[in-house]
Image: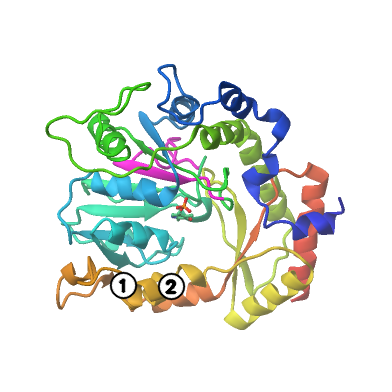
Amino acid sequence: MSLDKRLGQRFLPYGANYLDYSDMTELAEAIGHGVLFRYQTEHESIASRLERRVAERLGAAHVLAVHNCTEALRLALVSTRPRTGDLVHIPAATFVAVAGAVLSSGLIPVLVDVDASLSLDTTLLPPDAQRVIVAHMEGTVATLPEGVPYVIEDSAQALGARFPDGRHTGTRGYAGTFSFHHNKVLTSGEGGLVTTNDPDAWQTMRCYHDHGSARVPGRYPTWTADAYYGENFVTSEGVAAIQYQQFRHLDELLAGLERQHAMAMAELPARRDLQVLPRAAGDAKISLRFRWESRELRDAAVAALTAKGIANWTLGKYLLPEHPVLTGRRSLYADGFPWHLAPQGQPLALSRDGFARTRDLLGRTLCVPLSPELPAAEQLLAVRAVRDVLEAV
Ligand SMILES: *Cc1c(COP(=O)(O)O)cnc(C)c1O
């Protein structure tokens, strides 16, 4: 396959490149057994094996597989036993799923402005904040707030990233959430995981995700006299099997990202009007992030890369203060649930400047994905192709 063709195919990113039928041992096993329901049998399911593997790999005490990261966020939130209408502080620049998870849990999102690294600015949080979702966007390790009872680390975009102390993102807060959507580090099309170090929280989440039941694998679920209602977020053996295959490639994938990121740092043009945003040692280097001097230059770079078939994206889509889901405050419920519970006369946003700086930063930022699966020589050619385009803007 020609290099141009591969560059153009970057909408098949990261883990998707490692999908390999000949490596799907667990999937073959599940199909061989004729069982795709994880609680069908008494013996350890592939989903349980996956959870054990992830717990070991990430250093999390407990892991629960669900259908997607949005469900994982909901589970983490409801397991804190909130009151409906309680506030949850979330980053002002993140994927709208974070707000959706908060609202669908009957809670009210408060948009907290981000710092220069585009992560939630913990200095803006009020001292009595109870629940905060921090998102490690594009593999960038965010700072966690101190003294908040429930910090949920949304690691949907940061599987494999590490804090300076070596611990993985998603393992330091009350709970961590991960996505296996097509665009994430590893993929099963859709898929999610929630991690926690708190055994009671894990028990609550496990119960809620399976109709509120006390489940013994291999048996019909049972409900204790004090059962509460739940939903069904139970993963499938087929999906877990693909995730297991994907996990086999995590280290190789992260190393491929590191290698190409280092090449890019050495090769990219030094222009006074262009800054290559630095990345910390522990970040998962899933993209190159550029900050242009003006929005016009950024837009010109987007057009130039796109014309060459080089995948790229911008981050304006993440600006939640301008997202219709937040500005419209609409709900499918006739009484407007949960928006009708929002505190009156209190802005649901924390920013020093009405998000002006964040709007400006996002408007000048450009991201180019890396290609961990390419051999080093092709990675270098890909970096040079990006460099040539950026030099000519
Ligand atoms: C993708 C993403 C989600 C949602 O993940 P799904 O698995 O698609 O539900 C949540 N948060 C962030 C930051 C994401 O990028």
Q: Which residues are magenta?
A: 161-181
Residue 16 seen anywhere in this rendered image of the structure = yes
Q: Amino acid at mark 2?
A: Thr
Residue 153 seen anywhere in this rendered image of the structure = no
In the rendered image, the residue lying farthest to the left is 225
In the image, taking residue 168 as reference, residue 109 lies left or right, namely left
Neighbour class for label 1 at 10 Å: few (<14), some, many (≥20)? some
Q: CA distance from mark 2 to mark 1?
A: 9 Å
Residue 307 drawn above or below residue 311: below
Q: Amino acid at mark 1?
A: Ser
Q: Residue at x 32, y 50 (%)?
A: 74
Give the residue at mark 2. Answer: 358
Give the residue at mark 1. Answer: 351
Q: Is mark 2 within 8 Å of ligand 1?
A: no
Residue 207, label in figure: none
Give 88 or 363, whichever is nearer the viewer.
88
Q: Is mark 1 within 8 Å of ligand 1?
A: no
Give 264 or 47, whichever is nearer the viewer.
47
State yes or no: residue 345 in magenta: no
Q: Residue at x 55, y 34 (%)?
A: 238
Specify the principal SS of the magenta part: loop
Q: Residue at x 15, y 78 (%)?
A: 345
Q: Position of residue 28 (x, y in %)?
A: 63, 26
Mark found first going from the N terminus, 2 or 1:
1
Residue 243 drawn above or below residue 327: above
Do callouts 2 and 1 mark residues in contact (Cβ within 8 Å)?
Answer: yes
Q: Position of residue 165 (x, y in %)?
A: 42, 36
Q: Position of residue 108 (x, y in %)?
A: 24, 63
